[in-house]
Image (tube, grey):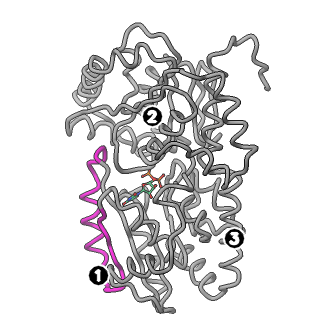
């Protein structure tokens, strides 16, 4: 991202939005803002930070991004947190919790200078959560940003993590349904996509056709696409089941495109299961490197319908990306997909492979409806889920947590 990006956003969202951004940022000029997460590549959080941090800098904030490091046991523990917060009954052995805390102690040591002096620290997800405790003295406000679907967490694990969360000044959730009772203010901020990133910019038809040719896709048959890490919560096996049901009636192809995230140790096993289930030449399982954003962009644009059949989903940036490209989405009836896929309007929400197959067949038979839903989908993203809106809410939040609490008007 280079200088002058704000002018380019103005062309997408209008000058009013950019004016508001500049005005709010004025009060935060020079503020030291540090974001911490657990991976630079793979997954939605990294995707957002790659775009949000440079834009905060362009607005005059002194923003930076740190990544916590750990060994495989650390990621095994944090992946278990992730699974438990999304509802799996996973008890985590004390020895792994000790690794989790020790890793955070060591990272706190390495990051002390940058974090202790920051005006605002945004800790993303549970992996770096204990940093605050181990940093010791601090100057600024610490905000925990939870991106996970915690609507029904496994209580013993949430209780353990809650001890760390309580020490923060505020928590940000993606959806009201995720908010847990805490002794500090909770904020709701939905994630966003960047319309100007390689993942989302317009591509010409030649480039899209050449990506399809590269993967042996037939341009004459409808294409169903799901882009996701290979993770059980994304239900890739359910996608394959749905695809098989559709294929008994209609000639159709499926792309399941995904990559690993460095903080996700379970991906390889899931990929193996997906490959074993995908015994059909019309099912294309693509394991992609983390930086092929234009390829994913092209596959999403080539799709007739985009599927995101998750059984739990914090938000689902892949849904937003597809909708921005004018695609109707058939998505799992869960978490952040509910904010985006408005049933019968921007797509369909489904709970089973049978439901997904039914909706796909319905849409394949009605190209006009498919097109209309895609247009509504794009409009919904334009109005609600672009980076500039998220940034505006971040700036508002920073001013809110820094202000005198007595000056705040609480709306009960
Ligand atoms: N993504 C990617 N390559 C892949 C799989 C996913 O670049 O092989 C991107 C995807 O386009 C999206 C993000 O990773 O921007 C995934 O975010 P999402 O919120 O959908 O899911 P998460 O992985 O955070 O659970």
Q: What element carries label 3?
A: helix
Quarter of the image where ligand 1 sits: bottom left
Evaluate if marks 1 and 3 touch, with contact meaning CB atoms under 8 Å apart: no
When the figure is inspected, residue 225 is found, relative to residue 62, above or below; the finding is below
Task: Please give the label number shown on residue 279.
Answer: 1
Q: What element carries label 2?
A: strand
What is the quadrant of residue 233 in the picture?
bottom left
Q: Earlier in the sequence, mark 2 or mark 1?
A: 2
Pointer 2 residue? 124
Give the spatial CA distance, label 1 vs label 3. Answer: 34 Å
Task: Please give the label number shown on residue 375.
Answer: 3
Q: Earlier in the sequence, mark 3 or mark 2?
A: 2
Nearer to us of marks 1 and 3 is 3
- Left/right of residue 342 with respect to residue 31 in the rendered view: right
Is residue 330 visible to us here? yes
**Number of residues whose C-alpha sits closer than 10 Å to that of mark 1, classed few (under 14), some (14–19) or many (20 or more):** few
Q: Give the range drawn in magenta.
A: 262-288
**Residue 225 location, x and y as percent?**
46, 73
**Residue 81 location, x and y as percent?**
37, 38
């Amino acid at each position: 991202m280079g200088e002058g990006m704000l002018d380019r956003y103005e062309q997408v969202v209008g000058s009013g939005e950019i004016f508001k951004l500049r005005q709010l940022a004025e009060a935060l000029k020079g503020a030291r803002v540090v974001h911490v997460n657990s991976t630079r590549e793979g997954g939605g959080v990294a995707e957002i930070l790659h775009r949000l941090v440079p834009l905060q800098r362009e607005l005059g904030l002194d923003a930076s991004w740190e990544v916590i490091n750990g060994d495989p046991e650390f990621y095994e523990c944090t992946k278990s947190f992730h699974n438990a917060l999304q509802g799996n009954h996973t008890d985590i052995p004390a020895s792994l919790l000790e690794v989790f805390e020790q890793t955070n102690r060591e990272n706190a040591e390495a990051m002390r200078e940058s974090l202790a002096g920051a005006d605002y620290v945004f800790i993303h997800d549970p992996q770096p959560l204990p940093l605050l405790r181990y940093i010791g003295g601090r100057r600024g406000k610490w905000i925990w940003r939870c991106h996970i679907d915690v609507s029904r967490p496994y209580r013993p694990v949430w209780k353990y993590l809650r001890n760390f969360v309580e020490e923060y000044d505020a928590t940000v959730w993606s959806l009201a349904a995720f908010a847990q009772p805490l002794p500090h203010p909770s904020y709701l901020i939905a994630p966003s996509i960047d319309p100007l990133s390689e993942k989302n910019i317009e591509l010409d038809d030649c480039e899209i056709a050449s990506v399809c040719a590269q993967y042996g896709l037939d341009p004459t048959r409808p294409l169903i696409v799901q882009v996701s890490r290979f993770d059980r919560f994304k239900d890739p096996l359910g996608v394959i089941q749905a695809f098989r049901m559709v294929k008994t009636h209609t000639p159709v192809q499926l792309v399941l495109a995904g990559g690993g995230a460095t903080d996700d140790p379970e991906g390889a096993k899931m990929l193996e299961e997906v490959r074993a289930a995908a015994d059909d030449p019309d099912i294309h399982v693509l394991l992609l490197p983390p930086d092929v954003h234009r390829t994913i962009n092209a596959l999403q644009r080539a799709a007739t319908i985009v599927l995101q059949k998750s059984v739990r989903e914090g938000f689902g940036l892949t849904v937003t990306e597809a909708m921005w490209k004018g695609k109707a989405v058939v998505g799992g009836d869960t978490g952040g997909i509910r904010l985006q896929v408005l049933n019968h309007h921007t797509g369909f929400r489904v709970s089973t492979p049978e439901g997904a197959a039914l909706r796909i067949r319905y849409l394949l038979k009605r190209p006009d409806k498919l097109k209309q839903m895609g247009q509504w989908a794009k409009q919904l993203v334009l109005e609600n889920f672009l980076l500039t809106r998220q940034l505006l809410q971040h700036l508002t939040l920073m001013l809110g947590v820094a202000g005198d609490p007595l000056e705040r008007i609480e709306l009960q």
